[in-house]
Image (cartoon, grey):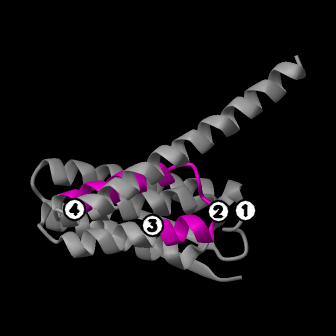
Amino acid sequence: LLIHVVLLQGSFIFFQAEDGIRDPLWSRGLGDVYKRQNKQSLTLMQQGEDREALRLLKRVKNLLLESECLSLSPLMNLTFNNMACAYKKLGKLKSALQCLNDSLTACHKYNETENIAVTHLNICAIYSHMKKFETAFNHAEQAVFKCKDEMSKLNIELELSLIHI
């Protein structure tokens, strides 16, 4: 049994059992911490503390990568997207784009489709800022297609739910 001590922002200490972290019930507490850290990074960016926000997000990203927990994969996507936002604010568009591409890679690796459209829209915004409009348009289209896919899945699930009523 491997135990990790996680210290974030000097105030949170969590113990993570390596054999239990793949269980969604065990990872829920960690997920809450990582969500709070993502929210805190957005607050820091709103206050103009972009470098501090990026530092915090990098720590969260590293912890998420270490955990390899499938139930935390939506947070990986969120963290990469927030990192891209911080890089964009710092004028580091290539780094922002790398984060977003890493987000897409993580989405495909963990079969995370729920928020992939947001990532494509963020990629669209970066390419647009770089004046690469055709590539930006392609990612905008991808976002629309992903949204349509998700909507059709929701409709199918809704129809199945109605059949069982």
* Residue ID at (63%, 67%): 110
Q: CA distance from mark 2 to mark 4?
A: 25 Å
The amino acid type, in three-letter code, at marker 4 is Ala
Q: CA distance from mark 2 to mark 3?
A: 12 Å
Q: Name the front one of labels 1 and 3.
A: 3
Quadrant in which the N terminus appears: bottom right
Q: Name the front one of labels 1 and 4.
A: 4
Query: Residue 145: x, y in percent?
Result: 52, 47
Query: Residue at label 1?
Result: 23
The amino acid type, in three-letter code, at marker 3 is Ser
Q: Name the front one of labels 2 and 4.
A: 2
| Label 2: element kind | loop
The residue lying toward the viewer, choosing from 6 and 45, is: 45
| Label 3: element kind | helix
Query: Residue 50: x, y in percent?
Result: 15, 61
Going from the N terminus, do you reach mark 1 or mark 3 first? 1
* Residue ID at (56%, 40%): 148
- Residue 6 in sight from this viewpoint: no
Going from the N terminus, do you reach mark 2 or mark 3 first? 3
Q: Is residue 55 above or below residue 118?
A: below
Q: Please indicate whether residue 34 sits to the left or right of residue 81 in the image.
A: right
Badge number at residue 111: 2
Query: Residue at label 4?
Result: 86
Crowding near the residue tagged with mark 4, few <14, some 14–19, many ≥20 C-alpha atoms within 10 Å = many
Crowding near the residue tagged with mark 2, few <14, some 14–19, many ≥20 C-alpha atoms within 10 Å = few
Q: Is residue 93 magenta?
A: no
- Direction front: furthest residue: 134
| Label 1: element kind | loop
Report the span colored magenta.
Answer: 104-128
